[in-house]
């Protein structure tokens, strides 16, 4: 399928790459991008061969947020239509957050507004230490609506108040201290840093990754009593998995498990 706002690549070792591809407007997002990116994500979700997703942007900016011309076009439309259009980003963010595969952000440049939301849905996000990040909506009379559940969860309420309410810009290095980025590196170190994360991800059982993502989400949102039952159930089920049998056998036999991408190179 041909796309106009995103670029898609897949690698034999199990990596799917989704790249925002509107560099002429700093990868600003519009309705077409939301639709296309969601279609790519569905493809990746249904493809068992894709085990890791790398999200990045073309050019020197990761994502400048929502395209202003696109947002201006919503003014005056019936409210039901505006809600349907706003849901596109909300659904894309939710799908990125919930997908049962590791999402690694290759944050290749600055990120603003909605771009911060994309960063916040990544399981691991590697950015550039001297680039600029900002939640800019308040400065232009708007609100960071659909991104707020993910950004607030990522950086915490206190940091959200610090950064949302005055649109304060901050560096990649500072983004690490907030928890927005997992690491911040120099531009010539970005690809190597992302590759290290991809390598580690491809050593892990796809089923374990999927269940662990659900486990993290559940435990974070529930109390001790609910977590006790849920976690005991997961381990009881795990002991009967083929993957657990294979993983323990590979340990005792001093070999790589069959899902480890290095095993195919041996």
Image (spheres, grey):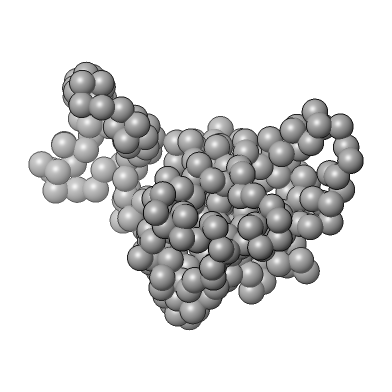
Image coords of residue 89 (percent x, y): 66, 42
- Which corner quadrant of the image does residue 134 belong to? bottom right
Q: Answer whether residue 125 is visible to the viewer in this image.
A: no
- Which corner quadrant of the image does residue 253 belong to? top left
Image quadrant holding the N terminus, namely: top right
Camera-nearest residue between 162 and 46: 162
Give the residue displayed 77% in from the left and 45% down from the top: 31
Camera-nearest residue between 178 and 46: 178
Residue 110 to residue 19: above or below:
below
Residue 251 to residue 67: above or below:
above
Give the residue displayed 16% in from the left and 36% down from the top: 249
Q: Answer whether residue 85 is visible to the viewer in this image.
A: yes
Camera-nearest residue between 115 and 157: 157
Instruction: Check the image and name the residue furthest to the left.
Output: 252
Give the total of numbered labels: 0
Left or right side of 43 for 124: left
Left or right side of 168 for 226: left
Image coords of residue 74 (percent x, y): 84, 44
Give the residue displayed 41% in from the left and 49% down from the top: 157
């Amino acid at each position: 399928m041909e796309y106009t706002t995103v670029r898609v690549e897949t690698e034999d070792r199990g990596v799917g790459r989704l790249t925002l591809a509107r560099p002429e407007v700093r990868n600003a997002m519009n309705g077409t991008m939301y639709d296309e990116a969601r279609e790519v994500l569905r493809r990746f979700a249904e493809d068992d061969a894709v085990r890791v997703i790398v999200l990045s942007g073309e050019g020197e900016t990761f994502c400048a947020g929502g395209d202003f011309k696109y947002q201006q076009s919503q003014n005056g439309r019936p409210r039901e239509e505006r809600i349907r259009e706003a849901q596109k980003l909300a659904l894309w963010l939710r799908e990125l957050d919930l997908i049962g595969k590791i999402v690694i952000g290759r944050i290749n440049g600055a990120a603003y507004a909605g771009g911060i939301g994309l960063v916040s849905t990544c399981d691991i996000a590697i950015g550039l230490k001297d680039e600029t990040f900002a939640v800019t909506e308040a400065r232009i009379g708007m609100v960071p609506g659909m991104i707020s559940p993910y950004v607030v969860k990522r950086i915490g309420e206190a940091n959200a108040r610090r950064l949302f309410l005055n649109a304060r810009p901050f560096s990649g290095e500072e983004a690490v201290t907030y928890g927005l980025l997992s690491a911040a590196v120099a531009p010539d170190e970005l690809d190597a840093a992302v590759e290290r994360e991809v390598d580690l991800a491809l050593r892990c059982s796809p089923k374990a990754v999927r269940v662990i993502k659900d486990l993290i989400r559940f435990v974070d949102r529930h109390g001790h009593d609910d977590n006790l039952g849920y976690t005991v159930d997961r381990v009881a089920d795990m002991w009967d998995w083929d993957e657990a049998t294979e993983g323990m056998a590979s340990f005792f036999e001093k070999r790589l498990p069959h899902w480890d991408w290095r095993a195919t190179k041996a």
